Image (spheres, helix red, strand yellow):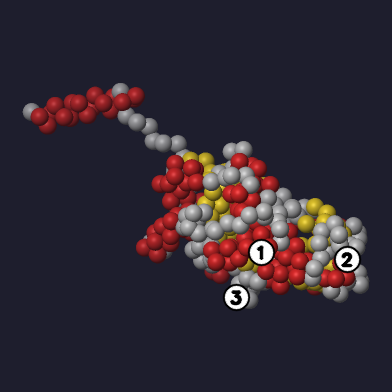
Amino acid sequence: MQFAKLLTATALVASIGWAVPAAAEPVNIRIGWSTMPGHMIPVLYLKPEILQHYGTSYTVEPVRFRGSSPQITAMAAGEIDMGAFGALVLALAVNNARQDVKVVADIIQDGIDGKHSETFMVRADSGIETVEDLKGKRVGSNAIGSASDTAMRAMFAKHDMQDKRDFTIVEVAFPNIPPMLDEAKIDMGPVLQPMSSALTESGNYRTLFTAKDALGPSQLVFLAAKTDFLEANRDQLNDFFEDHVRAVRWFTDPENREEAVQIIATFMQQSPDTLTHLFTERDYFRDPFMIPNIENLQNGVDVAVELGLAPTGLTVSPDYVDLSFVEEAKRRIEADPQ
């Protein structure tokens, strides 16, 4: 009798739509990025069969910026939930913009294990042979305060050279740096892959120095997120990071390289032949489980303070780090590698 009453009650509840809570909507994650193919964020969700939770727990909205530093304002204004930050940007976000943010995942690391380091290039016929030769010249920077900008300033500081006194910085979006070098509108600038290899092979350009020359191995760019967003959506973000790490591992797996390069080439509207550096020794290092190198990140913050780019320092760990998401992703993937 009691069982019959239970069945009747259950049927009644099921027949009343408002009595049964609807499944929660997926959390939309707005992620800032600035460069492709380095950051990879816009393409990681283009192959749904390698994602287990997309559209159920979360969706992703990539938002493009010129560099890392403009993402501080966007995060403060509530326009993005996560951003591709550099070391200086983290310090400025916390100390200047008073943002409560956490370092949550690796994006790219520079000069690690013999892999690529960002190149700062000049024309071969420019007569510029040393950093000192840039006195009185114009140098390109993708965004003041970005990871590239910090590395460049660190190299100038090693040679006792200062902006405005010894050279002039011109803000130029990454894609425009090679043509501006070619037209002699700037005398040096950071050139990303694949253009770095292409310009070197042409014989018309050469690398004056690299980011590793300036900073040593570095946590060049990492994913930072708003703390309140992390806490409010922890379950969904555990799903997101599992998929995020699985996607990066799929793209960087040598067995998938041809298809992975084709996906990126299609997104960038380029021929795969222009992306031969991808996922080789000529590419940046990416941690296999997207765990950032906090020691190298701390070094980057310290260098920014020494250069006077950040007014005050920052001890990154433990207050501004939350690796629980990538650690949970690693646990899940190792338990079910598929």
Q: In percent of the image, x 54 and y 63: which residue is there?
A: 294
- Using residue 98 as the reference point, say whether residue 331 is left or right of it: left
Please, is residue 112 above or below residue 326 in the view? below
- Per the image, the residue denoted by label 3 is 113
- Amino acid type indicated by mark 3: Asp
Q: Residue furthest bottom?
A: 114
Q: How far from the left and from the top, in percent, is residue 318?
A: 48, 58
Please, is residue 97 above or below residue 335 in the view? above
SS at mark 1?
A: helix
Q: Residue furthest front?
A: 312
Q: Which mark is residue 303?
A: 1
Viewer-nearest residue: 35 or 76: 76
Compute the Cα span from label 3 to label 1.
21 Å
N-term-proximal mark, 3 vs 1: 3
Callout 3 crowding tier (Cα within 10 Å): few <14, some 14–19, many ≥20: few
Image quarter (top left, top right, bottom left or bottom right) of the N terminus:
top left
Q: How far from the left and from the top, in percent, is residue 219?
A: 60, 64
- Per the image, the residue denoted by label 2 is 135
- Using residue 271 as the reference point, say whether residue 39 is left or right of it: left
SS at mark 2?
A: loop
- Amino acid type indicated by mark 1: Val
Q: In percent of the image, x 58 and y 63: which residue is there?
A: 298
N-term-proximal mark, 2 vs 1: 2
- Amino acid type indicated by mark 2: Lys
